[in-house]
Amino acid sequence: MTKFLETDRRTLLGMGMAASAAGAAALTGGSGVAAAAPTAPGAPAKTSLSPAQALARLLEGNRRFVTDQDNKSDISTRRRLALAAGQGPFAALVGCADSRVGPEHLFGVGLGELFIVRTAGNYVDDAGYGSLAYSVAALGVPLIVVLGHERCGAVDAATKLVTDNAQLPPSLSRMVQPILPAVVDARATLRAGGDLVDHAIHQNVRHVVRRLRQSTDPLLADPMRGDKLMVVGAYYDLDTGQVDFFDRV
Ligand SMILES: [Zn+2]
């Protein structure tokens, strides 16, 4: 048992994912996962944008997307080759797997600019959480966006499970389980005439944002306390193409 624990500890440290200040330092120190950090010659530098500047860049990109203006996404060979040496994204994003909500398109950005976790219903599981923590601690990302969207099928399925006791195949039922508290919350706070699914989509975003903001993991909590990291919620309107950042600090 002791041997197992020691092996496990070494594995965690080797990955640079130990949940401590020392672990955070290990992430940027040059071993394990840190090897993927943008330290190689020619690699893009870590972003110098503040959380507010990163948010402004997303807003501007979405404005161009909505108005059919040429976007500034760089997917050139030159950019690809620079990124082969490392990455320096300016924001991380939690989005839905839905094919209509590809984040790079909505925000008019190119290769290597967004660090993205996508699951149906934009929920953050352990792997997603670790991915976000890595993006902040190793890559210096100053902004995490939790992006829900109009007519989300995963939230719709979760809502039907709550309101109609709908039956889902086991794998899909397990998938929507983490969304259920947001649906229950939405049902309790729905205003007269409101749309339950749409309200649940917003509440689901708020739940994920709150979980990230309330994290005691120093990989996220320390930069948030130092105003180096901001977590915001957003909603994508399929019809207008507009992203509304509705849950800001
Ligand atoms: Zn969805």
Image: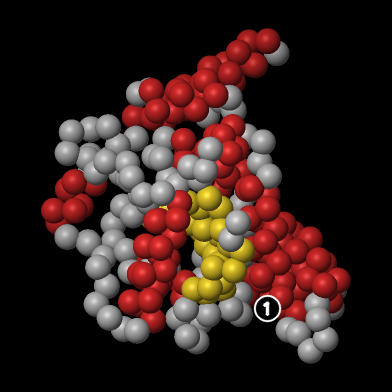
Check the image and report above or below for 107 versus 210.
below
Direction from residue 152 to residue 160 in the image, left or right: right
Direction from residue 5 to residue 59 in the image, left or right: left
Identified at 66% across, 41% down, the residue is: 215
Residue 32 picture location, percent across and down: 40, 26
What residue is disc 1 on? 198
The amino acid pointed to by label 1 is: Asp
Check the image and report above or below for 31 versus 69.
above
Q: Is residue 197 visible?
A: yes
Residue nearest the viewer, comparing 31 with 113: 113
Residue nearest the viewer, comparing 172 with 22: 22
Residue 240 picture location, percent across and down: 47, 85
Q: For the view shown, which residue lies furthest in the top direction?
A: 2
Residue 152 picture location, percent across and down: 61, 75
Direction from residue 178 to residue 91 in the image, left or right: left
> Which quarter of the image is occupied by the N terminus?
top right
Residue nearest the viewer, comparing 150 with 160: 150
Identified at 34% across, 35% down, the residue is: 37
Check the image and report above or below for 117 versus 158.
above
Q: Where is residue 53, by image quadrant?
A: bottom left
Direction from residue 122 to residue 86 in the image, left or right: left
Q: At numbered mark 1, what does the secondary structure look like: helix, strand or loop? A: helix
Check the image and report above or below for 160 versus 231.
below
